[in-house]
C-alpha cells in the first residue's frame, strides 16, 4: 500500500498502517482532505475497500468524504450528523489550548 504522506503535515507519517489506530487516523486524514476538495488517490480507494472494519468502528458522521466512500463501496449508510453552532474541531482546539491563527488577523 502507498501512504499519502501529504496528509501528515503535523507529524511524521507511520511507516506502515498495520495497527487499527494508524488505519483509523489515516482514514480520518484522507476523509478530511476529501471534505476540503482533495480527491483521494486511486490507491486509497483500493485500500479502503478492505477497511470496512475501520469505517464501521470509527464512523465520521459529519464527513461528506466518509459518506462518499461508504456509498461507493455499497456499504449501508450511517446517519449524517449536521452540527449547529461550534464545530467539533473548534471545541477540541479550545479544549486542548490551540488558538485560531486567523483570529489575530481581525
Image: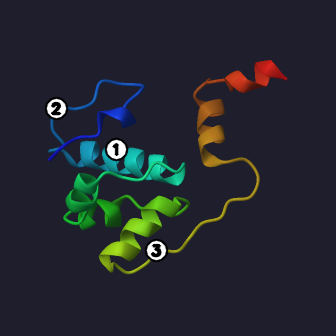
**Where on the picture, by quarter, is residue 47?**
bottom left
- The image quadrant where one finds the C terminus is top right
Q: Residue at x 26, y 67 (%)?
A: 52
Q: Position of residue 15 (x, y in %)?
A: 16, 32
Identify the mark nearer the N-term, 1 or 3.
1
Secondary structure beneath label 2: loop
Characterize the local packing of mark 3: few (<14), some (14-19) or many (20 or more) Cα atoms within 10 angstroms: some
Q: Residue at x 33, y 67 (%)?
A: 56
Task: Indicate left or right for 64 with 3 as reference.
Answer: right
In the rendered view, how is the structure colored?
rainbow
- Residue wearing tag 1: 25
Q: Give the foreground label among 3 and 2.
A: 2
Q: Residues within 10 Å of mark 1 (few under 14, many from 20)?
A: some
- Looking at the image, which residue sits at the far top? 104
| SS state under label 3 | loop
Mark 3 touching mark 2, by CB under 8 A?
A: no
Mark 2, residue position: 15
**Mark 3 → mark 2, Cα distance in angstroms:** 31 Å
In the depicted view, which residue is nearer to us: 3 or 51?
A: 3
Q: At which x and y percent is residue 84? A: 74, 58
Give above or below for 26 relative to 75: above
Residue 78 is tagged as: 3
Give residue 96's quadrant in the image. Answer: top right
Q: CA distance from mark 1 to mark 2?
A: 13 Å
Q: Earlier in the sequence, mark 3 or mark 2?
A: 2
Whole-percent x, y for residue 83 in the image = 68, 59
| Element type at mark 1 | helix
Amino acid at each position: 500500500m502507498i501512504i499519502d504522506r501529504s496528509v501528515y503535515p503535523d507529524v511524521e507519517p507511520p511507516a506502515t498502517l498495520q495497527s487499527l489506530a494508524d488505519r483509523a487516523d489515516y482514514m480520518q486524514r484522507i476523509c478530511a482532505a476529501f471534505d476540503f476538495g482533495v480527491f483521494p488517490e486511486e490507491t486509497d480507494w483500493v485500500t479502503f475497500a478492505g477497511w470496512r472494519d475501520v469505517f464501521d468502528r470509527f464512523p465520521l458522521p459529519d464527513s461528506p468524504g466518509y459518506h462518499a466512500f461508504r456509498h461507493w463501496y455499497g456499504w449501508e449508510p450511517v446517519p449524517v450528523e449536521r452540527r449547529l453552532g461550534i464545530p467539533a474541531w473548534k471545541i477540541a482546539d479550545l479544549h486542548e489550548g490551540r488558538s485560531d491563527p486567523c483570529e489575530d488577523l481581525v
